[in-house]
Image: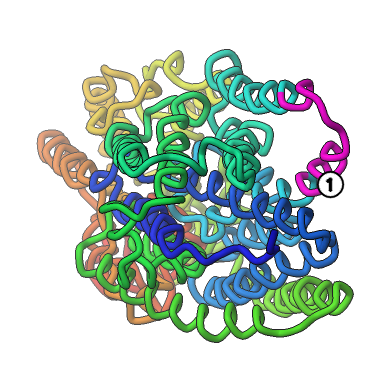
C-alpha cells in the first residue's frame, strides 16, 4: 500500500466550512450561534488525517517519528510564530501596560504549548473580557499539539498488540473523555476547564482517528458503501453539522455530549465522500471552498487577534459593520500572504529533525522572548506615567484625619473643608494646585463609598468600609465650626441611587438635604461639586486608539447627568453653590484629554495629573474659591 495519501479536495472544503463557521461566530455570535463547534470539526479532521498518515506509512514500512514531528513543526509553527510576533508588536501600540502584561503571560504559556491551561484558569470562554484577548484562539492549537505529542507514540505502542481488548480499550478511552467533560460541566460547574482541557477534548480527535483506522482497511465496510448509502451519509452528516452550528449557542453545556452531532456529522461526511463524489462533495470540492480550505489555518490564526484588538479599542464586543468589513478584508489579506509565503515556503523545504527543531521552534521562541525583553523597557512605568494610573499615593488623605490632610498654600490656616467619598479623594491635586494659586489652604478628608450625610446608614456599606465612614462623618460634625466654607464631593449617581447599588442608602437624598441645612448653620458657605462623567469605555484604550487615528468615541455613562441634575435641584432648594467639574471635563479635547493624556485613572476617578491640570483651567475660569 502506498504511503502517499491521495489528495481529497472535499476535505479542504470541509476545513473551509469549519473555519467559516468559527469566523462567522466570532464576527457576530447572532449570525451563527453555534459556530464555535467548527473547532470540534477541526479536532475530528486532525485525528482523522494524522492517523491516516501514520497507518499508511506503517503499512508501507516508512513511518518515522522524526519525519512525523518534522512535518508537524513545519506545518504549524512558522505561521503561528509569525502571527505571535506581529500580534506582540501591535500590542506595544494598542495595549495599556497592565493589559500588555496579560499578553506577555499568554505568550509564555503559548511557547510551552499549554496556552489552553492559561486561558482555562482565567474565565469563561464566552465572557466579555475574552473577546479582547489577542491569543485566546491558540488554546485549540495547544490542545492539538498536546494530542500530537502522545498519540503517535501510543498508537505505535499499542499497534504491536492484537485482540479485541485493544478495540474495547479504545472505545472506553473515547467515552471517558466525553464523560469527563460532562463531569466538569454538570458536577463541578467548571465550563472553562471543560472547554479548554485536553482530557475533555482528546475524545473528539480519537473519534477521527478511529475512522481513519477503519477506512484504510480494504475489507472495511466503509470502503464498500454504495452510491445511495454514500450520498445519504453525506447529506445526514452535513445536516448534523449545520444543525450544531445553528442550534447550539453560548449558553449550551459544551463540549461533552453536545459536541457529538458536529463530530458525527464530520465523520459521516468523510465516510460518505470516500468512494462517491455526490452533490455535497461536488460543492465542497469547488474552487471557492477549496481555496478557503487551503488557507484555513492562516485564516484561523489571523482573524482572532484582528477582532480582539478592534474590540479592545472600540470598547465592546459588538463591532459596527464598517469595522467588521475591515476585519474581514485584513484577515483574508494576511491569510493569503501567510499561506503563500510562510506556510508553502517552509513546507517545501527539506529539513532534518534537528534542523526543523532549531529553525521552527528554538529560533522563533528566542525571537519572541527577545521582542518581549525589548518591549518590557517600553512598558516600564516612570513616575510621570504613574501619575496617570492613580489619584495619588500616601500623600492623599483618604481614610486619614488630621493636620497632614491640609492642602494648598501651607502658609495659610485652612478655612475650607472638603469631604466626601472617593470622589472627594480624587480631588487631592486639584485642591493642592488651586489652593496654591489662590492663596488658601483646605482640609481634605474622605472615606470609600461613604455617603456625605450625617445620619448615613453605614449598614449598606461593605463591612470593611463602615468604621472609616463613621470616622469621617463624626470628624465633619465635630470640626465643621472651624471652617468658613464646606465643600461636598461624591459619586452622586451611586449615592443618590440613580445607578442601582446594594451599597447605597435608599434614604440618602432626604438625609443629604438635612445635612446641607445643618452645614449652613452659622452662615457657613456650602458648595457641592458635580460628579465628573462616568465612562463606559476604558479611557486609556480610547486615548491609544485616537493616537493611532482609529475613529473611537469616548462613551459616557447615562447615569451621571441625571445625578448631577438632581444635585443642582437640591442645591437650588437649599441655597447651596455648585462647582461644575462635569462640564469642565467634557470641555476638554475629545472630552477627556488634557495635555495629550487622559484625565482619568479608571472609569470614574480623575488621575493625579488630570486633577492638577484641571485646577489650572478652573483657576482661569469660573473660580468659586478665589
536 lies above or below 88: above
Question: Horizontal and vertical percent for residue 589?
Answer: 28, 75
Q: Is residue 10 shown in magenta?
A: no
Image position of 60 (left or right of 623): right
Q: Position of residue 385 (x, y in %)?
A: 59, 70
In the image, 359: left or right of 338? right
* Quarter where residue 214 is shown: top right
State the residue position of label 1.
Answer: 153
* Range of residues picked out in magenta: 151-167
- Residue 29 picture location, percent across and down: 30, 46
* Quarter in which the N terminus is drawn: bottom right
Residue 317 coordinates in the image, percent (x, y): 33, 52
- The quadrant in which the C terminus is found is bottom left
Q: Is residue 585 above or below residue 169?
A: below
Magenta segment main secondary structure: helix
Front residue (pair 525, 450): 450
Q: Secondary structure at mark 1?
A: helix
At 85% across and 77% down in the image, what residue appears?
Answer: 352
Q: Which one is in front, 557 or 384?
A: 557
Please tell me in which quadrant of the rendered image residue 507 appears: top left
Tell whether position 161 is magenta.
yes
Amino acid at each position: 500500500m502506498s504511503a502517499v495519501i491521495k489528495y481529497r479536495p472535499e476535505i479542504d472544503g470541509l476545513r473551509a466550512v469549519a473555519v467559516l463557521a468559527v469566523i462567522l461566530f466570532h464576527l457576530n455570535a447572532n449570525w451563527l450561534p453555534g459556530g464555535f463547534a467548527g473547532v470540534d470539526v477541526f479536532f475530528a479532521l486532525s485525528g482523522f488525517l494524522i492517523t491516516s498518515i501514520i497507518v499508511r506509512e506503517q503499512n508501507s514500512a516508512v513511518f518515522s517519528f522524526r519525519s512525523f514531528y518534522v512535518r508537524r513543526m513545519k506545518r504549524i509553527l512558522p505561521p503561528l510564530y509569525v502571527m505571535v510576533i506581529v500580534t506582540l508588536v501591535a500590542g506595544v501600540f494598542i495595549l495599556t501596560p497592565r493589559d500588555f502584561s496579560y499578553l506577555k503571560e499568554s505568550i509564555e504559556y503559548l511557547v510551552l504549548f499549554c496556552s489552553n491551561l492559561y486561558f482555562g484558569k482565567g474565565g469563561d470562554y464566552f465572557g466579555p473580557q475574552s473577546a479582547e484577548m489577542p491569543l485566546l484562539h491558540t488554546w485549540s492549537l495547544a490542545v492539538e499539539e498536546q494530542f500530537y505529542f502522545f498519540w503517535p507514540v501510543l498508537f505505535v505502542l499499542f499497534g504491536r498488540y492484537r485482540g479485541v481488548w485493544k478495540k474495547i480499550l479504545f472505545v472506553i478511552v473515547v467515552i471517558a473523555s466525553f464523560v469527563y467533560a460532562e463531569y466538569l460541566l454538570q458536577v463541578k460547574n467548571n465550563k472553562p476547564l471543560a472547554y479548554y482541557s485536553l482530557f475533555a477534548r482528546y475524545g473528539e480527535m480519537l473519534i477521527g482517528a478511529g475512522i481513519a483506522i477503519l477506512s484504510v482497511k480494504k475489507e472495511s465496510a466503509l470502503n464498500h458503501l454504495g452510491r445511495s448509502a454514500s450520498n445519504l451519509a453525506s447529506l445526514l452528516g452535513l445536516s448534523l453539522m449545520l444543525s450544531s452550528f445553528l442550534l447550539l449557542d453560548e449558553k449550551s453545556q459544551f463540549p461533552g455530549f453536545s459536541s457529538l452531532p458536529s463530530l458525527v456529522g464530520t465523520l459521516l461526511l468523510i465516510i460518505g465522500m470516500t468512494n462517491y463524489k455526490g452533490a455535497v462533495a461536488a460543492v465542497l470540492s469547488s474552487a471557492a471552498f477549496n481555496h478557503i480550505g487551503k488557507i484555513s489555518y492562516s485564516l484561523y490564526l489571523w482573524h482572532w487577534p484582528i477582532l480582539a484588538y478592534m474590540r479592545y479599542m472600540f470598547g465592546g464586543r459588538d463591532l459596527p459593520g464598517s469595522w467588521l468589513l475591515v476585519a474581514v478584508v485584513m484577515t483574508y489579506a494576511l491569510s493569503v500572504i501567510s499561506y503563500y509565503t510562510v506556510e508553502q515556503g517552509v513546507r517545501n523545504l527539506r529539513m532534518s529533525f534537528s534542523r526543523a527543531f532549531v529553525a521552527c521552534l528554538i529560533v522563533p521562541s528566542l525571537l519572541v522572548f527577545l521582542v518581549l525583553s525589548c518591549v518590557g523597557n517600553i512598558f516600564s512605568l516612570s513616575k510621570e506615567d504613574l501619575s496617570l494610573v492613580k489619584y495619588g499615593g500616601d500623600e492623599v488623605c483618604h481614610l486619614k484625619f488630621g493636620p497632614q490632610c491640609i492642602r494648598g498654600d501651607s502658609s495659610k490656616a485652612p478655612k475650607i473643608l472638603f469631604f466626601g467619598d472617593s470622589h472627594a479623594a480624587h480631588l487631592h491635586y486639584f485642591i493642592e494646585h488651586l489652593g496654591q494659586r489662590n492663596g488658601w489652604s483646605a482640609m481634605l478628608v474622605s472615606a470609600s463609598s461613604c455617603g456625605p450625610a450625617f445620619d448615613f446608614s453605614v449598614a449598606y456599606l461593605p463591612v470593611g468600609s463602615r468604621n472609616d465612614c463613621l470616622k469621617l462623618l463624626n470628624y465633619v460634625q465635630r470640626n465643621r465650626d472651624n471652617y468658613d466654607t464646606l465643600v461636598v464631593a461624591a459619586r452622586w449617581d451611586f449615592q443618590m441611587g440613580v445607578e442601582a447599588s446594594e451599597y447605597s442608602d435608599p434614604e440618602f437624598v432626604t438625609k443629604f438635604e438635612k445635612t446641607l441645612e445643618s452645614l449652613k448653620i452659622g452662615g457657613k458657605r456650602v458648595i457641592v461639586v458635580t460628579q465628573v462623567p462616568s465612562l463606559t469605555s476604558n479611557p486609556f484604550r480610547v486615548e491609544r486608539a485616537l493616537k493611532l487615528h482609529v475613529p473611537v468615541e469616548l462613551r459616557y455613562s447615562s447615569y451621571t447627568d441625571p445625578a448631577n441634575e438632581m444635585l443642582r435641584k437640591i442645591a437650588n432648594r437649599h441655597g447651596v453653590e455648585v462647582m461644575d467639574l462635569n462640564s469642565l471635563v467634557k470641555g476638554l479635547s475629545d472630552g477627556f484629554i488634557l495635555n495629550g493624556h487622559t484625565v482619568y485613572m479608571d472609569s470614574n476617578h480623575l488621575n493625579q495629573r488630570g486633577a492638577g491640570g484641571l485646577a489650572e483651567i478652573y483657576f482661569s475660569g469660573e473660580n468659586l474659591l478665589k
